Amino acid sequence: MQPIRTGRTLITLVRADDADDLSAYYLRNAEHLGPWEPLREEGYHSADAWKDRARDFAGEALKGFAYRYVVRLETGGKIIAVANFTTVIRGVFLACHLGYSIDHDMQGKNLMFEVLDRLIPHVFGSYGLHRVMANYMPENERSGALLKRLGFEVEGLARDYLKINGAWRDHVLTARINDADDRTGSPEG
């Protein structure tokens, strides 16, 4: 697959050779991302652990189970963000979950919007999905504002939805629908 470009970034599906850069991204941002992620056992973000994980992620994309992307500035270099479209369900649902994060030093530069504004239509068009769901903790106002700006609509609140940073946390449930899809459900379109 060819890289996806935005005005300032280069986006690629995770490849096995991204392992060292993914390890560096997560280790560099451990404190920044910690409040928003599950607790991880020691060594979870080691380069060796990421070698297996990156290979597995690349395989998930080939099988259509998940599409995980790394983001670099257009000039190359280190990973500055990740965007994961996971738990892909086909059949009559045609949906997935979106998760994302950005390097601490890259916050506030509109980069995550730029990336997701390009990636979401790509995922809809390339993988035939109808719905992308993204959930966030109510106190994560930045994430809520980003999703709203991207066209996600709030669908509800789930109590004790995920165990984040060692505690069960409520999440606001949102989704964005592929408006290009035929809403009648007829095979003729």
Image (cartoon, rainbow, N blue to C red):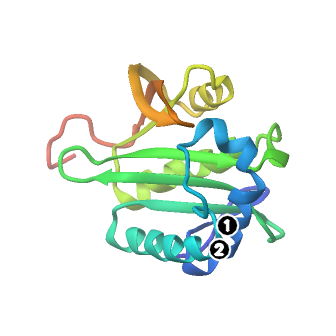
Callout 1: few (<14), some (14-19), or many (20+) C-alpha neighbours within 10 Å?
many
Q: Residue furthest front?
A: 42
Q: Which mark is residue 47?
A: 2
Tell me: 169 left or right of 183: right
Nearer-the-camera pick, 147 or 168: 168
Distance from disc 1 to disc 2, alpha carbons, whole Å, reads: 5 Å
Tell me: 17 left or right of 152: right
* Place of residue 18 in the rendered image (x, y in percent of width and height, measured from the top left): 63, 74
* Place of residue 14 in the rendered image (x, y in percent of width and height, measured from the top left): 56, 69
Q: Are marks 1 and 2 in contact (CB under 8 Å)?
A: yes
The reply to whether residue 30 is in sight is yes
Q: Residue furthest left?
A: 187
Q: Residue furthest bottom?
A: 17
Image point (39%, 20%), residue name? 159
Q: Is label 2 in a helix, a strand or a loop?
A: helix
* Place of residue 45 in the rendered image (x, y in percent of width and height, measured from the top left): 62, 63
Q: Indicate the amino acid at tag 2.
A: Ala
* Place of residue 123 in the rendered image (x, y in percent of width and height, measured from the top left): 46, 55
Q: Which residue was labeled with disc 1?
A: 23
Image point (33%, 53%), residue name? 88
Image point (56%, 71%), residue name? 49
Image quadrant where residue 156 sits: top left
Q: Is residue 82 above or below residue 180?
A: below
Image point (40%, 60%), residue name? 66
Q: Tell me which label, 1 or 2, sits earlier in the chain.
A: 1
